[in-house]
């Protein structure tokens, strides 16, 4: 038998090697057999082209109805798994939290914050230090000390709604910022028009935008994209329009945001440092953090960015929740009537609701839960990340898998709720979890707290958040009727209950609403509450600008004049 010529052997080896390389390349993006099911993949890209850029929670919920409560995406060689049932979330994110509590790589957040932004920071020494510190400053005792400030800011919010009801969206935004600014940095935000407040709003908006789905290439899933230059060199043979499309313009945005954040939060932190050095005290969180910085092992950068994380996260979610609640209440006057009957019976009309009344207001508590269910402010929460292999049912969850809890899909599932599309607070009176009659409560034990996160990543500010919502929803329903605006033809203006603004949190765009005091007596009490809140607010107004100081004093003088008119009945 003749020997095979060397050239033939070499050619055969080259062909086999080429075939193997092609096979390996084409296998990138293919779903492994033991992964949860999901949309059909294409070679190399996987499901990259399927990944929704906006309203991903809606697309994920549709896919959950097709593929089940656990399904997967492939983006290149990366894995994403979406969880859309209480059982899946509980088993994967709670019971297996030892290996599923990490955060996925978030390149944009790391560039802007040096990996020190608490909601996004990955597991490790930095996360442990930040978590321990924030648990200390947001303890039940610390939150109790700030309840009076929350009540005082709520009194201001109700007065703002009384005097300028058409600007409710702006009032919620100012309130949410001011209350969290006061408790975090010891300084209120009396006006949205002040330069400091405008700077915060722009910084937060730009950060939310660039962190939102579709604002940048999928850098965390396709890491090589981060190496595309900010400006493609002149000598690259591509048309200018193509270069403009391909260039990494996000790099300039990140660089600008990084500098703006550092400057803004350095200025906010400075008064906290000065108060600590002078022995002054207004119980702000960041003053406490600064005083214990060395004891807790915090660096200057960690301290700076912890303040950013608390301020931005707290103000975003609180304002969004109140706007969502107003939309749903305006569309459901029958819910308002039932709530007001309960408030009149328990609280009466001689005073406004207090936090201690909440135990006797089951329907108000039910409304709060139903708003969370219908319009969760974080419809997909913040993704988790597996640090090692685990599994659920018969499906593999490999290490380095992004895990997305689809709260929107869970809260809108007919498998858990009867008529989930209906705004029905009574479901929480029929069952504490709001679940359907035939649903097993054992598999849904902590369902109501899903909006506050899972496992080791649950929200440390849950007490502060719950107090804020309880104070405002009870006072809003006690003091006001929230109606649809009337069209020129006399018919009620229809509201779009599905409208959202595409950003990190689920925010209702501005909409018209007719917000009226329930009676002259209610208006009088609302005005008196605002005036009476002055002593609580003054310690948080010591470092305001002259313009802001004058603004809030003029507002109080106006309230005093209006109170005389309301009390005497004369105009």
Image (cartoon, rainbow, N blue to C red):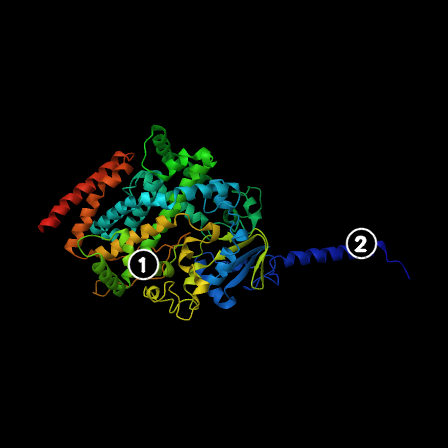
- Crowding at mark 1 (Cα within 10 Å: few <14, some 14-19, many 20+): many
Q: Is residue 152 left or right of residue 44?
A: left
Measuring from the top left, give residue 100's x and y in whole percent.
53, 53
Q: Earlier in the sequence, mark 1 or mark 2?
A: 2
Q: Which residue is mark 2?
A: 10
Q: Is residue 555 left or right of residue 448?
A: left
Q: Which residue is mark 1?
A: 365
Going 17% across and 41% down the picture, which residue do you hit? 557
Going 27% across and 57% down the picture, which residue do you hit? 512
Camera sees residue 385: no
Q: Secondary structure at mark 1?
A: helix
Q: Is residue 176 left or right of residue 80?
A: left
| In-front residue for pair 527/79 | 527
Measuring from the top left, give residue 560's x and y in whole percent.
15, 43
- Vertical side of 112 occupied by 81: above or below: below
Measuring from the top left, give residue 379's x and y in whole percent.
42, 57
Picture quarter with the N terminus: bottom right
State which mark lies toward you, 1 or 2: 1
Going 47% across and 47% down the picture, which residue do you hit? 120
């Amino acid at each position: 038998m003749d020997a095979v010529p060397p050239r033939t052997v070499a050619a055969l080896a080259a062909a086999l090697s080429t075939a193997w390389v092609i096979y390996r390349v084409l296998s990138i993006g293919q779903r492994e057999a033991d992964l949860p099911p999901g949309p059909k993949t294409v070679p190399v890209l996987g499901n990259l082209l399927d990944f929704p850029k906006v309203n991903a929670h809606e697309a994920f919920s549709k896919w959950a109805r097709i593929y089940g409560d656990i399904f997967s995406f492939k983006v290149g060689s990366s894995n994403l798994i979406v969880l859309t049932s209480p059982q899946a979330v509980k088993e994967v994110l709670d019971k297996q939290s030892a290996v599923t509590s990490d955060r996925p790589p978030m390149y944009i957040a790391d560039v802007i914050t040096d990996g020190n932004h608490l909601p996004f920071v990955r597991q490790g020494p930095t996360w442990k230090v930040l978590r321990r510190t924030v648990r200390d400053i947001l303890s039940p005792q610390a939150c109790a000390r700030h309840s009076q400030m929350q009540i005082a800011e709520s009194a201001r919010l109700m007065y703002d709604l009384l005097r300028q009801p058409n600007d409710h969206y702006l009032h919620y935004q100012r309130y949410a910022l001011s209350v969290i600014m006061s408790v975090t940095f010891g300084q209120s935000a009396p006006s949205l028009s002040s330069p400091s407040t405008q700077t915060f709003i722009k910084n937060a908006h730009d950060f939310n935008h660039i962190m939102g789905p579709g604002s940048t290439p999928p850098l965390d899933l396709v890491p090589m994209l981060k190496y595309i230059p900010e400006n493609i060199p002149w000598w690259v043979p591509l048309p200018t329009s193509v270069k403009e499309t391909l260039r990494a313009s996000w790099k300039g945005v990140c660089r600008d945001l990084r500098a703006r954040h550092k400057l803004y939060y350095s200025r906010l932190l400075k008064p906290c440092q000065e108060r600590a050095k002078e022995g002054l005290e207004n119980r702000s969180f960041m003053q406490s953090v600064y005083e214990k910085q060395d004891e807790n092992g915090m660096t200057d950068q960690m301290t700076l960015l912890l303040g950013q994380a608390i301020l931005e996260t707290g103000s975003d979610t609180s304002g969004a929740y109140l706007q969502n609640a107003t939309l749903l209440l305006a569309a459901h006057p029958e819910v308002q009537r039932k709530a007001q009957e309960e408030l009149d019976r328990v609280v009466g009309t001689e005073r406004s609701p207090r936090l201690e009344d909440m135990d006797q207001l089951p329907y108000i508590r039910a409304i709060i839960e139903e708003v969370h269910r219908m319009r969760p402010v974080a419809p997909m929460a913040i993704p988790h990340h597996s640090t090692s292999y685990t599994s659920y049912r018969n499906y593999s969850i490999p290490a380095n898998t992004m895990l997305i809890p689809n709260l929107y899909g869970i809260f809108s599932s007919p498998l858990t709720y009867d008529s989930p599309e209906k705004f029905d607070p009574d479901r929480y009176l029929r069952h504490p979890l709001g679940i359907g009659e035939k649903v097993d409560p054992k598999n849904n034990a902590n369902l109501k707290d899903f909006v506050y996160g899972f496992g080791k990543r649950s929200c440390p500010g849950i007490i502060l958040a719950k107090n804020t919502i309880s104070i405002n929803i009870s006072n809003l329903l006690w003091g006001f009727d929230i109606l649809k605006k009337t069209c020129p033809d006399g018919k009620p203006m229809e509201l779009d209950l599905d409208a959202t603004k595409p950003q990190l949190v689920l925010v209702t765009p501005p909409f018209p609403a007719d917000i009226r005091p329930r009676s002259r007596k209610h208006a009088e009490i609302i005005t008196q509450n605002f005036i009476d809140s002055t002593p609580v607010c003054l310690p948080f107004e010591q470092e305001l600008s002259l313009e802001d100081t004058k603004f809030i004093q003029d507002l109080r003088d106006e309230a005093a004049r209006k109170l005389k008119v309301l009390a005497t009945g004369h105009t």
